[in-house]
Image: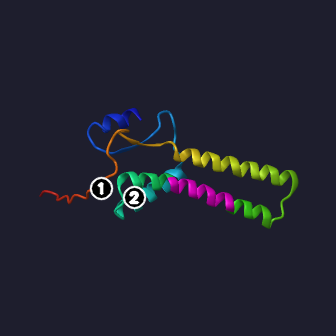
Amino acid sequence: EAVGKEVAKLVDHVIVCKESEELGDIQARIFQYHFYQWLFRGATILNSFEHAKESIHKRADSLAEHYKNMINNYNIKGENETAALDMINEYVKSMRNEAEKYVLIPADGEHNVKFRFVECKLRG
């Protein structure tokens, strides 16, 4: 986050990870994919950022539903069911926490703008 704040002095919009936090690979891919999908479709930087974070929440919910269906389909009951549900709930919680690690800076920046695509030409 400290490096991001320095970069934010030079550019208007920077996405960073909260200081002393690490990002999960899967969640980072989900975030990146959805952020650019929204951005390239014309959403504002802020909306793209919020949708990307929400996509991690939706993925967590989708996986929880999938695993709960597996428990029902395999007729897992009793202590095994409780243990499995506890593991699912812990995984969903950790995945949702991943989404909150992303920060759009500067915090007081005007991020409700659309990304401007600039044509670059190579010299030579």
Q: Position of residue 19 (x, y in %)?
A: 47, 34
Read off the magenta span.
54-65
* Residue type at the position of mark 1: Phe
Left or right of 69 in this view: 116: left
The residue carrying mark 1 is 115
Pointer 1 local density, CA inside 10 Å: few below 14, some 14–19, many at least 20: some
Kindly check if marks 1 and 2 are in contact, taking CB atoms under 8 A apart as contact: no
Q: How is the image coloured?
A: rainbow
Q: Position of residue 121 (x, y in %)?
A: 17, 59
Q: Residue furthest right?
A: 78
Main SS of the magenta part reads helix
**Separation of disc 1 and disc 2 at Cα?**
10 Å
Q: Circle 1 — which element?
A: loop
* Residue type at the position of mark 2: Tyr
Query: Which quarter of the rendering shows the N terminus?
Result: top left
Label 1 or label 2, whichever lies nearer to me, is 1
Which residue lies at the image location 42% right of the left edge and 56% below the top edge? 35
From what the image shows, is residue 17 above or below residue 56?
A: above
Which residue lies at the image location 71% right of the left edge and 60% below the top edge? 67
Q: Circle 2 — which element?
A: helix
Q: Position of residue 75 (x, y in %)?
A: 84, 64
The residue carrying mark 2 is 36
